[in-house]
């Protein structure tokens, strides 16, 4: 290169180093994000949150914990999420290689034949020239990251990798919640089946009692028929409950990554939930919720894509060097046959300004969309926390009233049955009504208990628990 070329490249490099900081920007979390009042009717100032508790301390049932661990080991969706991490890690490593020069080895033999028939040789003489060239060389090319193009690409690849890692964590938290929810649902069906079978046994005995009362002319045949209908009303509930149990077991097995089969489980009445339900502060969702973190990493990818789009408005600087051996004779190939070259080049497309503007406009629009998705993920997280917390509070609020309702209905059943058997102060319709109301209240009590347990699970997941 000439001295004037060297000076030109030096001037360009100097200008680039001065202005490079203004071409790309450093990522900072947007200050416009809305994190206040994400939890409805809640203004907690305590940073303590159940999301910081390991999942195997939140759940006290050893059989449930064993199922969760099996799911973490075998669930196919979680395995695919891990493979996504492997792929994004490879892309990240590939982006780092762009900082290093490329290296090529070139070895070839070239045979050239040139006819000299057109030259002034005597008639009939045609002389052909045949030459053979042997060449062995190494070349390298290196693009200098003047404007931050390579740095932006690397940061985008890093954010993509972190996003896939957060996505895997989101799959894990959802998996834990799904296993626990289905497990407690299964226990509730078990309890409802137990109550219904006990009720059926009682109603079968009641039919015999009503028949005896009819023989004693205390009740009519209508009461016998009603008691039999009441018995069958309990019977028809059992097949549906058994079907629900079978289907829930099968659903759990899918989560565990295994074929359908029975599930080893405990009982609903033995389940223990954390004594203190702490939710922390809404801003903690930024670090605790994997899907919120994934949304932020996706925003960072879009941010770096905008940085990258800006660098296309500036020329790229590439250094190319090559060296090796070239000779016409193979015998003295390594003697007096060394060649080398060093080239520094600036590349600035002349007619791409419109393309670059469209590329930048697209990147900026995608960055705005990614920001909106980031904010949306926070709002959804706040909604889920609010819903789960309120569901838990309502389940707790119903506990005392439901217990009193069931106790009162049990007494009503006893009183009406005694009155029917020993006096004419009542009729079988009163007995029938009290029995039906009792069964409905008992099944509703199981549903209340399930609501409370599932609310804790959903709150734990909504706050970002289960992946730490």
Image (cartoon, grey):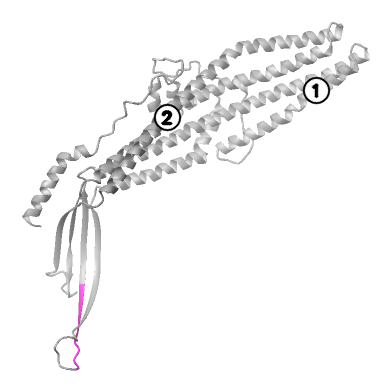
Q: Measured along the vertical axis of the image, is residue 141 above or below residue 284? A: below
- Taking the image as shown, residue 230 lies to the left or right of residue 164, namely right
Residue position marked by numbered label 2 in the rendering: 376
Q: Measured along the vertical axis of the image, is residue 356 above or below residue 373? A: below
Q: Nearer the viewer, residue 92 or 270?
A: 92
- Taking the image as shown, residue 81 lies to the left or right of residue 365, namely right
> Element under label 2?
helix
Where is residue 368, by image quadrant? top left
The magenta stretch is 124-133
Q: Nearer the viewer, residue 140 or 69?
A: 140
Q: Is residue 464 visible?
A: no
Q: Is residue 4 visible?
A: yes
The quarter of the picture where the C terminus appears is: top left
Q: Measured along the vertical axis of the image, is residue 446 above or below residue 94? A: above
Residue position marked by numbered label 1 in the rendering: 231
> Element under label 1?
helix
Q: Position of residue 212 (x, y in %)?
A: 90, 15
Q: Position of residue 191 (x, y in %)?
A: 66, 23
Q: State the CA–CA distance, disc 1 to disc 2.
A: 52 Å
**Rendered residue at 58%/30% (across/down):** 182
Furthest toward the left, the residue is 3
The disc, 1 or 2, on the residue closer to the chain's N-terminal end is 1
Q: Position of residue 81 (x, y in %)?
A: 45, 40
């Amino acid at each position: 290169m000439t001295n004037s070329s060297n000076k030109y490249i030096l001037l360009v490099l100097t200008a680039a180093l001065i202005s490079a900081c203004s071409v790309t920007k450093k990522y900072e979390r947007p200050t416009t994000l809305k994190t206040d009042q994400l939890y409805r009717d809640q203004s907690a100032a305590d940073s303590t949150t159940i999301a910081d508790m390991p999942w195997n301390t939140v759940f006290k049932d050893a059989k449930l914990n064993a199922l969760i661990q099996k799911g973490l080991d075998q669930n196919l969706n979680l395995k695919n999420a891990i493979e996504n991490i492997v792929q994004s890690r490879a892309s990240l490593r590939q982006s780092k290689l762009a900082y290093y020069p490329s290296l090529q080895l070139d070895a070839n033999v070239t045979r050239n034949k040139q006819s000299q028939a057109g030259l002034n040789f005597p008639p009939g003489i045609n002389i052909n020239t045949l030459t053979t060239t042997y060449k062995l060389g190494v070349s390298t090319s290196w693009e200098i990251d003047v404007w931050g193009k390579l740095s932006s690409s690397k940061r985008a690849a890093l954010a993509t990798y972190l996003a896939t890692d957060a996505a895997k964590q989101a799959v894990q938290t959802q998996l834990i919640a799904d296993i626990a929810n289905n497990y407690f649902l299964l226990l509730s069906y078990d309890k409802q089946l137990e109550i219904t079978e006990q009720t059926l046994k009682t109603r079968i005995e009641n039919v015999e009692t009503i028949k005896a009362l009819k023989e004693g002319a205390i009740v009519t045949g209508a009461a016998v028929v009603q008691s039999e209908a009441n018995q069958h009303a309990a019977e028809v509930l059992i097949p549906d409950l058994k079907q629900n149990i079978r289907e829930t077991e099968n659903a759990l097995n899918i989560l565990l990554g295994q074929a359908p089969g029975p599930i080893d489980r405990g009982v609903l009445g033995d389940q223990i939930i954390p004594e203190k339900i702490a939710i922390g502060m809404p801003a903690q969702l930024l670090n605790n919720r994997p899907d919120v973190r994934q949304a932020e990493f996706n925003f960072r990818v879009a941010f770096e894509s905008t940085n990258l789009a800006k660098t296309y408005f500036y020329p790229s600087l590439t250094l190319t060097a090559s060296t090796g051996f070239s000779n016409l004779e193979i015998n003295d190939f390594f003697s007096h046959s060394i060649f080398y070259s060093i080239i520094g080049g600036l590349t600035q497309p002349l007619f791409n300004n419109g393309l670059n503007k469209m590329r930048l406009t697209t990147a900026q629009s995608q960055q705005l969309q990614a920001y909106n998705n980031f904010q949306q993920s926070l709002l959804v997280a706040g909604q889920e926390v609010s819903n789960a917390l309120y569901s838990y509070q309502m389940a707790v609020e119903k506990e005392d009233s439901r217990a009193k309702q069931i106790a009162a209905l049990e007494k009503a059943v006893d009183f009406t049955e005694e009155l029917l058997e020993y006096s004419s102060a009542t009729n079988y319709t009163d007995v029938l009504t009290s029995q039906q109301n009792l069964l409905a209240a008992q099944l509703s009590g199981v549903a209340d208990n399930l609501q409370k347990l599932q609310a804790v699970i959903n709150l734990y997941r909504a706050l970002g628990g289960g992946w730490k």
